[in-house]
Amino acid sequence: MNEDRHRSGAPWRNFHGRLKGKALRPRQEEMLRDDLGALSPGAVSWDENPGRAPLDLGARFPGREEVWLEIGFGGGEHMVAMAAAHPQVALIGAEPYINGVAMLLGKIRDAGVDNVAVHPGDVRDLFDVLPEASISRAFLNYPDPWPKARHHKRRFVTAGHLQPLYRVLRPGALFRVATDIEDYVRQTLEEVPAAGFERVPQDIHRAWPDWPGTRYEAKALREGRPPHYLTFRKPAAAE
């Protein structure tokens, strides 16, 4: 535990998973140095925002109709495709794996999208500072499956993650989940409704009309694992 951080009032949270993989290429190092700061959604860390003031999303994204959230954007292809297809909205992505962040920055440069923000860290820290009922759509695409039964509590679809997500979603907001792991589907169908969400009926094997696909999906298909697509809604009457 980082004692200084703990004494500052920040909650201590275990993080499970990789933060960095193979060595970054020089261009990726350059983008992390030159591009990432300008793409921040605002002061998220406890050092930058010790009072935990909510982010001012209206000031950060002036003129945007809605703000969407991608939880663990992987290599960033879905996030950039959605930003390009929906220029009227803003997207915030959270991803602690720095190699994925570097990949996303390259895609942002190549696509020229200007309606994105990037938090290179745990989405739980972002939940701390997102205003209540500020997010109109959330995406969870091919999350870490944590296949061993004793690790299922580490999956995103548990109360510790779903409750703060529910808080930041607007009434009527959609929560989309894509996965190729059948047991992840099982847990999702059990725990997401238990957190207060309504399931939106759909063909579980048919992607959404604006779904661009991801490299993780392509890998799953190559290896014979069919994708599953689930949609949930925060009830419109929710307060």
Image (spheres, rainbow, N blue to C red):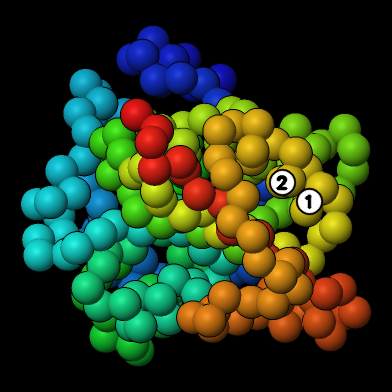
**Residue topped by disc 1:** 184
Q: Position of residue 197 (x, y in %)?
A: 55, 40
Q: Quadrant of residue 4?
A: top left
Disc 1 to disc 2: CB gap under 8 Å: yes
The image's mark for residue 188 is 2
Q: Residue at x 39, y 20 (%)?
A: 10
Q: Position of residue 209 (x, y in %)?
A: 53, 81
Q: Residue at x 26, y 85 (%)?
A: 112
Q: Residue at x 59, y 56 (%)?
A: 200
Q: Residues within 10 Å of mark 1 (few under 14, many from 20)?
A: many
Q: Is residue 109 at all visible to an observer of this figure? A: no
Left or right of residue 49, residue 98 in this image = right
Q: Position of residue 174 (x, y in %)?
A: 47, 55
Between 46 and 128, which is closer to the camera in this rendering?
128
Between 11 and 35, which is closer to the camera in this rendering?
11
Q: Is residue 235 at all visible to an observer of this figure? A: yes
Amino acid type at image mark 2: Thr
